[in-house]
Amino acid sequence: MRRLTRPGFWLAAALLVLLLLAAIAAQQFRLFERGWFLVQEWRHASEWREQSAWLPDYVATLQAQPIAGLDDDVSALTYDPDRRSLFTVTNQKPHIVELSLDGRVLRKVPLVGFGDPEAIEYISRGIYVITDERLQRLVKVRLDDDTLFVDAAESQQLSLGIGLNGNKGFEGLAYDSQGQRLFVAKERDPVSIYEIHGFPHTNPDKPFAVHVVDDPERDARLFVRDLSSLQYDERTGHLMALSDESRLVLELNADGRPISALSLLGGRQGLEKSVPQAEGVAMDEQGRLYLVSEPNLFYVFEKQAAE
């Protein structure tokens, strides 16, 4: 019994508990995988920089600018190359919101029949896909200059009952226009990215056939705690994955391997303060990155010349 009263015993016990807690935290936050990724990113920097967007070279040129005129949180972001503007959605009072490239509200279009819109993605001129998170529903919508509202009941829809989990459903979208692939991100439990072929249905002369592809091996390499948004880079064929909880944008190569990252922590990438709750990322044809964060903050990141 005397051993139990010795200070050395309690010190050793406390250290053991701290080590166990540290190991649990490291596993929960995927710190080992993240550390190994940083080593790989450093080792292959000169090689991968030439073949990718290379996110470490990006610096915030506009940060934490409030989006004036919105009284609801924004979710997701997509770039429209025809209009040279950005689109996001709000979910408490469902609207499509068009933004200028410097974060000003250009117009709001009410959404009718949408329960919880979480993402919007540009497909082609005037055509977009919106996710309804809780129902795991994808809705193809048309949006023109004179559109007054968008009604889900009048739109092409696809429902996917994959790993239904309350409000931890489809959170992000990205589209590969050449491969005609729609990438859909499941937020968490588990973090997953699905590849959908055949939706939206754009050729009426062909049958409506949908094929869903998953990649558990790629998803296991995603050392992020959640997924908030996706962006497909047409220039490189790489996918950008935004994680709010991990404060990262990850660049995945064509094989689905993380090869570079943009940190959303204060003091990194030119940020004065950490991005509070990143919800959407988009990229224009020059490679400029746009990001929105709750509550309604707007950011721009631009690539700087390598030193």
Image (cartoon, rainbow, N blue to C red):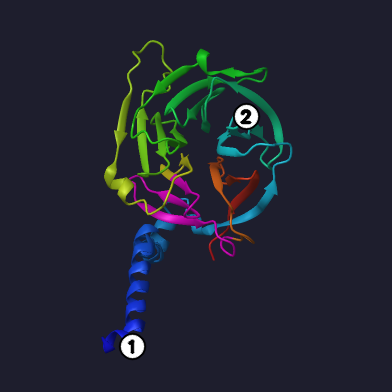
Q: How busy is the neighbourhood of tag 2: few (under 14 within 10 Å), some, or many (20 plus)?
A: some
What is the number of the mark on residue 93? 2
Please count the marks in the image.
Answer: 2
Q: Position of residue 152 (x, y in %)?
A: 52, 18
Q: Residue at x 62, y 55 (%)?
A: 60
Residue 274, quarter of the rendered image: bottom right
Q: Position of residue 209 (x, y in %)?
A: 32, 18
Q: Is residue 268 magenta?
A: yes
Residue 157, quarter of the rendered image: top left
Seen as rendered, the residue at the extreme top is 205
Q: Position of residue 225 (x, y in %)?
A: 41, 51
Q: Residue at x 71, y 38 (%)?
A: 104
Question: In this rendering, would 289 be left or right of 133?
Answer: right
Instruction: Answer whether labels 1 and 2 touch (C-beta < 8 Å).
Output: no
Q: Nearer the viewer, residue 223 or 46?
A: 223
Q: Secondary structure at mark 2?
A: loop
CA–CA distance in space, label 1 to label 2: 60 Å
Amino acid type indicated by mark 1: Gly
Q: Is residue 71 visible?
A: yes
Q: Is residue 251 magenta?
A: yes
User: Which image quarter is the C terminus in?
Assistant: bottom right
What is the number of the mark on residue 8? 1
Magenta part of the protein: which range? 240-269
Question: In this rendering, would 74 be left or right of 128?
Answer: right
Please report whichever mark, 1 or 2, sits nearer to the chain's N-terminal start: 1
What is the number of the mark on residue 275? none
Q: Residue at x 56, y 49 (%)?
A: 277
Q: Secondary structure at mark 1?
A: helix
Amino acid type indicated by mark 2: Lys
